[in-house]
Image (cartoon, rainbow, N blue to C red):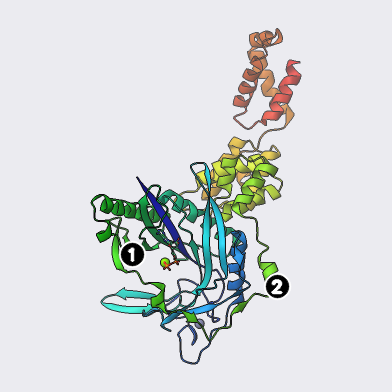
């Protein structure tokens, strides 16, 4: 009886080398306050200088989501007071963001759905408060890191749709190579705005904002909990009392949301244009460069299907991360047959990665996989033997050829060795040979099987087939 309405705000850290308004490094995880300067420490007299890389990346994002890119946008001061924000205002964009009116498409239960992107604007990140042993400390390494805040329309209708949207957005950012979008490191953070309304009603009801969700699972749980809470309040006749515009936090231990503070209206931030920064005017040349974006996952899926004959389900797995797609494309560029590449990447390699190992940290990189698959294709080893080689290489060092040698897996293609075995088999099965010759074709498989067995898997099956055909006439 209720319809769920969700709009998401995502803060993604752009992967520029330096901060958005100074030349301090953006590197993560270093000693506190080692990447700071007068500008990001907000010392009097320091002035911000806009990082063009951040602008370029924002434009690429706009191009990827079919948005309007404002050739002129404006930076504002957003005033608020927290110890991690040394200027006491954040430089952000307000009335004129760099990107507006975009869209992306999600697939949920086999249906394609358009989700509007209201805006995406550039802003600086704050530092980090650290509370330990009764003290509060602040680390300003992150202060001034470029963020792109991406705001969706309230078009999402379930937590499943919200997760699908976030995964799509995550993929776009990664394939564009404009953000690491690493959720653990906080470079992809999401605030979820959630409301309910009676089915059929088109007006928007009171929204609650759940802050700083940093895993897909928590986002799903937080939304589900919040929908439950609001629906229960409605059914108990307590909606007006219990659901009001506020900011809530998700408790990841008890999987509930808790009130944090009343929600500020934008008026409380007293936005005004930053007098230290000129409006951003995007030069024509920069614009034209930045909108030339690389192939995204969705386009790769279509191309793999069309040009390489890959099945859709497989193509989706191959494009589930930038690294997997790159690995696959390297195999195909090395002229490994796409079919072999798909199986060996999806079934054999991904199947062997465990304990959090990923394609990037796989002991068998694409170059090594290419060597291995070439040895299958040129008949040096059987597919079965190749699996042994792969098992070995997942745990040990070594070149493919050296491992084949070491494990004694080379297929015998030498005719005389195979013929000797075939002669044995045929004379030991004279009755079956007679049956075969009188028309029982099916027995051919029996002879192949026996020969392969005697050869202990080392015989090249193509060769065995060929020689048996000759012998049996
Ligand atoms: P603020 O910064 O005040 O949160 P924004 O405009 O940045 O405002 O973000 C508002 C977000 O809330 C958008 O994603 C929008 O789609 C969503 N939203 C607005 N109204 C509702 C509502 N009634 N229910 C759910 N989401 C909503
Ligand atoms: Mg918000
Ligand atoms: Zn700095």
Residue drawn at (45%, 57%), measured in percent from left and top? 154
**Residue that label 2 marks:** 284
State the residue in front, 97 or 445: 97
- Which residue is disc 1 drawn over? 245
Mark 2 vs 1, N-terminal side: 1
Q: Indicate yes or no: mark 2 CB to ligand 1 under 8 Å.
A: no
Q: Is residue 354 left or right of residue 341?
A: left
15 and 102: which is toward the camera: 102
Q: Position of residue 171 (x, y in %)?
A: 54, 56
Q: Position of residue 14 (x, y in %)?
A: 54, 68
x and y, in percent, of residue 439 in the image: 70, 9
Residue depth check, mark 2 versus mark 1: number of the one nearer the observer: 1
Residue at x 61%, y 22% (from the top left corner): 449
- Ligand 2: image quarter: bottom left
State whether label 1 is within 8 Å of ligand 1: no
Kind of element beneath mark 2: helix
Seen from the viewer's position, the closer of residues 119 and 350 is 119
At horizontal 34% and vertical 74% (from top left) the residue drawn is 130
Label 1 residue SS: loop
Q: CA distance from mark 2 to mark 1?
A: 42 Å
Q: From the image, which quarter does the N terminus lie in?
A: top left
Within-10-Å neighbours for mark 1: few <14, some 14–19, many 20+: some
């Amino acid at each position: 009886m209720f319809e769920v309405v969700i709009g998401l705000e995502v803060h993604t850290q752009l992967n520029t080398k330096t901060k958005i308004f100074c030349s301090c490094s953006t590197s993560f995880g270093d000693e506190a306050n080692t990447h700071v300067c007068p500008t990001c420490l907000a010392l009097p007299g320091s002035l911000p200088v806009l990082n063009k890389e951040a602008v370029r990346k924002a434009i690429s994002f706009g191009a990827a989501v079919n948005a309007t890119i404002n050739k002129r946008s404006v930076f504002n001061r957003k005033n608020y007071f927290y110890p991690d924000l040394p200027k006491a205002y954040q430089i952000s964009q307000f009335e004129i963001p760099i990107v507006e009116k975009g869209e992306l498409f999600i697939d949920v239960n086999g249906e394609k759905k358009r989700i509007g992107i209201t805006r995406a604007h550039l802003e600086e990140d704050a530092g980090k408060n650290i509370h330990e042993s009764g003290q509060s400390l602040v680390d300003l390494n992150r202060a001034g890191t470029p963020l792109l805040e991406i705001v969706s329309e309230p078009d999402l209708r379930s937590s499943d749709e919200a997760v699908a949207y976030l995964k799509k957005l995550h993929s776009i950012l990664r394939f564009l190579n404009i953000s690491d979008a690493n959720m653990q490191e906080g470079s992809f953070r999401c605030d979820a705005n959630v409301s309910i309304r009676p089915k059929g009603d088109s007006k928007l009801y009171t929204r609650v904002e759940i802050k700083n969700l940093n895993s897909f699972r928590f986002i799903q749980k937080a939304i589900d909990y919040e929908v439950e809470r609001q629906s229960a309040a409605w059914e108990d006749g307590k909606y007006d009392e219990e659901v009001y515009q506020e900011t809530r936090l998700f408790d990841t231990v008890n999987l509930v949301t808790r009130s944090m503070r009343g929600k500020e209206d934008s008026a409380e931030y007293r936005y005004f244009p930053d007098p230290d920064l000129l409006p951003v005017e995007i030069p024509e040349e920069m614009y034209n460069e930045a909108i030339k974006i690389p192939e995204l996952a969705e386009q790769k899926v279509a191309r793999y299907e069309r040009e390489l004959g890959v099945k859709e389900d497989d193509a989706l797995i191959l494009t589930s991360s930038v690294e997997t797609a790159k690995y696959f494309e390297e195999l195909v560029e090395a002229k490994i047959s796409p079919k072999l590449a798909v199986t060996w990447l999806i079934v054999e390699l991904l199947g062997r990665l465990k304990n959090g190992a990923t394609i990037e940290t796989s002991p068998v990189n694409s170059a090594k996989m290419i060597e291995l698959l070439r040895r299958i294709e040129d008949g040096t080893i059987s597919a079965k033997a190749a699996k042994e080689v792969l098992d070995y290489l997942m745990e040990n060092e070594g070149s493919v050829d050296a491992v084949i040698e070491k494990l004694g897996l080379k297929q015998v293609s030498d005719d005389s060795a195979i013929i000797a075995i075939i002669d044995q088999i045929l004379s030991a099965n004279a009755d079956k040979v007679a049956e075969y010759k009188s028309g029982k074709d099916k027995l051919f498989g029996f002879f192949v099987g026996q020969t392969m067995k005697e050869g202990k898997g080392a015989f090249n099956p193509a060769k065995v087939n060929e020689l048996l055909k000759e012998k049996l006439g």
